Image (cartoon, rainbow, N blue to C red):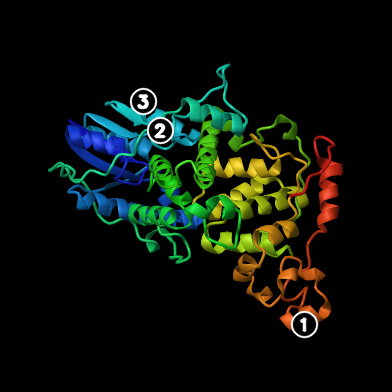
């Protein structure tokens, strides 16, 4: 039995990989990755530079992991819809196996490949903890509220145990002219190495996994919202690219944290991820339009200067600006900082959430359509299980609460480093003598706020919202 195991950028690992393990136990295996021109074509990588860097490193890690076990990674120039059926026939394989895709584009691609193949395309679960579409209300409908989805998941879903990586794999079949050359280098696709971006690859991901559960995981419940301390797992890119499986992270959380408050809080984040994939499976249209119909005609505005200030970290609100710079330079932003930044763009600048969503997708190393869309629509108040549209995050109060010493702001906005804690999130409120002592000249070294928070909040609530309700500030 000869099997192509088709890696697709969402399962770049050897451990807990059911198609690979089963195929290796039943005969010859050809591990394959298709270099899709829409990602690897000239100039395409710059559309998602941090994500492509993580992908290249993860492919190199996968190639090394396969080679170390006696196999290798075959690289094939795409597109997969034509290239894969061609080589499947040429190599006389009996079947093609892969993990199931959840995103609408991936599902359409798989349908097209399945029609073109002369052998069966077998799809396995593995991107999520439970098959998308398997968690339903009593009426058989998709959930639209996270809490209810979580209850049903914990009651109905069987996650199972992560598979260990095989110690050895069958050698690649001889005489087929398989190309197992090197993974493209950064310069090959027009990228420069950014040392700030989280390192890709299964070994690096597993190291992060071990480090988290051996260290800060027990502090997760109390400190997970703090932007100035690093207690989160930093596994989001690993989960996006599948260098570590969601199932293994889930298993480890139970083993190390049990049912402690930190264990429950951490698994809730995995279930939010799950909720995003299940929502996208049933409602693929959310990638193009608001989940809530009453936001279809929402009167978004667009001011080029305000948009540029938000993207470049020049709004005059330090927490918002620090998150903008971290995104551009590091390709990662904590969940709390993402929510504050998204709320500011949509509710205080009245700029369409889809612009912010696309901007984040360009620069995030962990950019994932399901998760990015869920987060942006939640923050804008128009999504599935969204925060109430009338809740407007105050970036100053959020900074006081989740960056109390200003460590996060000082890291990304060193020009404000000498400001006292009292003014680090509100430099415009500092007396002239404090600003002078800190070497800060407002309007030169750091901008004045582009909007007045109270006025912008009132404009959103009273002039554009789909309903009239009392505001809630957190």
Q: Give the labeled residue for mark 3.
A: 115
Work out whether 241 lies above or below 132: below
Question: For the point 80% across and 69% down, which residue is it?
Answer: 428
Tell me the SS state at disc 3. helix
> Is the N terminus in the top left, top right, bottom left or bottom right quadrant?
top left
Disc 3: CA contacts within 10 A as few (<14), some (14-19) or many (>=20): few
Mark 2 or mark 3: which comes first in sequence?
A: 3
Observer able to see residue 287: yes
Determine whether label 1 and label 3 are within 8 Å by CB.
no
Quarter of the image where one finds residue 223: bottom right
Gap in Å between the C-alphas at discs 1 and 2?
A: 58 Å
Question: For the point 73% across and 39% down, which residue is it?
Answer: 388
**Of residues 156 and 309, the one drawn nearer to the viewer in this rendering:** 156
Work out whether 117 lies above or below 312: above
Tell me the SS state at disc 1. helix
Q: Give the labeled residue for mark 1.
A: 436
Question: For the point 30% across and 50% down, which residue is it?
Answer: 62
Work out whether 80 lies above or below 42: above
Disc 1: CA contacts within 10 A as few (<14), some (14-19) or many (>=20): few
Residue 103 position within the rendered picture, expressed as x and y whole percent measured from the top left: 49, 35
Looking at the image, residue 443 sits to the left or right of residue 237; the answer is right
Looking at the image, residue 244 sits to the left or right of residue 331; the answer is left
Q: Which mark is residue 159?
A: 2
Residue 110 position within the rendered picture, expressed as x and y whole percent measured from the top left: 40, 31
């Amino acid at each position: 039995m000869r099997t192509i195991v088709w890696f697709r950028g969402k399962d770049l690992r050897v451990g807990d990989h059911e198609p690979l393990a089963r195929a290796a136990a039943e005969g010859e295996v050809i591990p394959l990755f298709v270099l899709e021109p829409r990602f690897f074509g000239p100039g395409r990588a710059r559309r998602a530079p941090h994500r492509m860097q993580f992908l290249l490193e993860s492919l190199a890690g996968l190639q090394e992991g396969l080679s170390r076990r006696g196999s290798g990674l075959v690289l094939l120039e795409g597109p997969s819809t034509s290239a894969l059926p061609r080589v499947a026939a040429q190599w006389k394989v009996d079947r093609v196996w892969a993990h199931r895709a959840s995103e609408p584009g991936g599902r359409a691609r798989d349908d097209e490949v399945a029609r073109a193949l002369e052998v069966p395309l077998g799809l396995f679960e593995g991107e999520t903890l439970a098959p998308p579409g398997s968690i339903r209300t009593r009426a058989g409908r998709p959930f639209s509220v996270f809490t209810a989805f979580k209850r049903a998941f914990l009651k109905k879903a069987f996650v199972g145990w992560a598979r260990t990586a095989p110690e050895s794999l069958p050698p690649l079949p001889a005489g087929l002219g398989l190309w197992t050359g090197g993974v493209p280098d950064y310069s090959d696709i027009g990228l420069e190495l950014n040392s700030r971006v989280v390192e890709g690859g299964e070994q690096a991901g597993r190291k992060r996994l071990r480090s988290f559960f051996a260290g800060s995981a027990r502090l997760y419940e109390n400190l997970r919202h703090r932007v100035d301390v690093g207690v989160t797992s930093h596994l989001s890119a690993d989960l996006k690219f599948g260098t570590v499986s969601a199932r293994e992270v889930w298993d480890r959380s139970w083993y190390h944290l049990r049912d402690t408050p930190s264990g429950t809080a951490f698994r809730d984040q995995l279930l939010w991820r799950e909720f995003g994939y299940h929502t996208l499976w049933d409602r693929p249209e959310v990638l193009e339009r608001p989940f809530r119909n009453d936001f279809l005609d929402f009167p978004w505005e667009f001011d080029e200067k305000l948009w540029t200030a938000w993207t470049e970290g020049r709004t005059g609100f330090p927490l918002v600006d620090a998150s903008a710079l971290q995104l551009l330079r590091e390709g990662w932003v904590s969940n709390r900082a993402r929510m504050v930044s998204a709320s500011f763009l949509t509710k205080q600048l009245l700029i369409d959430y889809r612009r912010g969503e696309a901007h984040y997708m360009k620069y995030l190393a962990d950019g994932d359509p399901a998760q990015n869309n869920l987060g942006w629509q939640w923050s804008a108040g128009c999504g599935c299980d969204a925060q109430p549209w009338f809740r407007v995050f105050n970036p100053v109060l959020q900074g006081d609460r989740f960056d109390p010493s200003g460590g996060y702001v000082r890291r990304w906005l060193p020009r404000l480093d000498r400001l006292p804690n009292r003014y680090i999130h509100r430099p415009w409120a500092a007396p002239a003598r404090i600003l002078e002592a800190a070497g800060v000249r407002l309007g030169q070294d750091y901008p004045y706020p582009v909007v007045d928070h109270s006025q912008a909040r009132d404009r959103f609530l009273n002039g554009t919202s789909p309903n009239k309700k009392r505001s809630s500030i957190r």
